[in-house]
Image (spheres, rainbow, N blue to C red):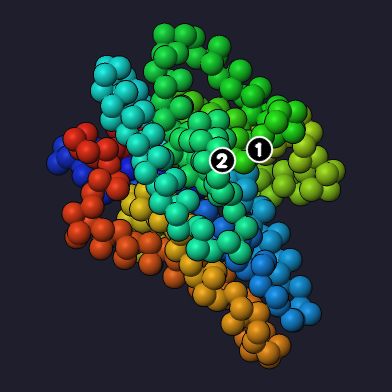
Amino acid sequence: MDPDATRVRFRHRHRSGTPASESHRAQWADAAKGVCIILVVLWHVIVKDYLQINWHITVPVLGLWGTLGEQFLPLRMPLFFTISGVFAANAAQRPWRVVARSRIAGFLYLYVVWLLIHTAILTAAPELPTDRATSALGLLEQLTITPSNLWYLYALALYFTIAKATRRVPRVLILVPAAVLSAVAAAGLLDTPGNRAGLYQNLVFFLAGLYLRPQIQRWAATASRPRLLLTSGAYALALAAMAVAGAQQWFGVWLAVSVVAVIFGITAAARLARWSALSDPLARLGRITLPIYVIHMPVLALLHRLLLVPVSGLPKSAQGLIVLGYPVVLSGLVISLSLAIHRGLLAAHARWLFALPGSGRVEAAK
């Protein structure tokens, strides 16, 4: 992704009459999106590049990075989708013709366009361990039933369809089956090739953000330091208990841990929003997650092809100097290059790569 792009919008506007609390809530949500997209890129850097390098060092840094990345798995995409649902609450109330074009068709369009781009570029980096179509049948499968690394866009189109089609159904009758589906998929009780698992597991979080928007906003607006300590402790305890018991695939456990993670994430983002020096740049990043999401994998693939052999061939002493900070530096480079490419494409009038032509801006928000 997370793959994402929760709100595909290139400008963020506040009306002059917007209450301070609304502005604060927008700030925390965008800051949370910024953190989530960083975690998405960092995870891909770790598993698709960092752990593929032939490191000659004996210090267990590789295991530390892998373990650290795993601790955020119950957080980054569930939180991303929860915020997507919060931002989508108003959009889902619009007429079918509006939702069908600006949201459903808009996200499917972006998914198809960037799937074709990814498929073409990833052929130049076969060493990168990632899902890719290698045949016409494989491409058709990714276009229909087994989404690619761009599954977040596919999921948003599907989730908007479900939310709109069931808007008159009692919410509990939608949330409960979505939660069961999430638990079943996480327990490995469904066939989930490719990225189907993420598709099944995160519907409940999108719907929760959509249905529980007022409660989530109140929770964020009243976030306190004791609550942050409590939720962070609960998340750490849940992760530890799941790991010690080996309960990752026990029915309902991953879902429960993810719920705790989202509650912690909302609380932490709300507290973070109080420090503008840190939250402002994260919020700015959170408002432009789409270009990072769709561009970062091809960028990473090409960097992986460029760096794999030279870094693997470095002497032990040189590798020791870079092994600890390598994922952070490469993640920053990937994000920076993705944004630079985005600016270049916009300057070349290629806005059609980021929005369905004739539909204005695609957004999963407001």
Amino acid on which the number 2 mark rests in the picture: Gly
In front here: 198 or 14? 198
Residue for point 42% across, 47% down: 116
Tell me, yes or no, whether the two marked residues, 2 and 1, touch with CB atoms within 8 Å. no
**Considering the image in quadrants, where does the C terminus appear?**
top left
Quarter residue 18 falls in? top left
Residue count near mark 2 (Cα–Cα under 10 Å), binned few <14, some 14–19, many ≥20: few
Between the residue at mark 2 and the residue at mark 1, the CA separation in whole angstroms equals 12 Å
Q: Residue furthest right?
A: 245
> What residue is at 85 percent from the left and 43 percent from the top?
245
Q: Residue at x 44, y 70 (%)?
A: 333
* Kind of residue indicated by mark 1: Pro
Identify the disc placed on residue 138. Answer: 2
Residue under numbered circle 1: 193
16 sits left or right of 64 in the view: left
Evaluate whether residue 204 shows in this view. Answer: yes
In the displayed image of the protein, which residue is found farthest to the front? 136
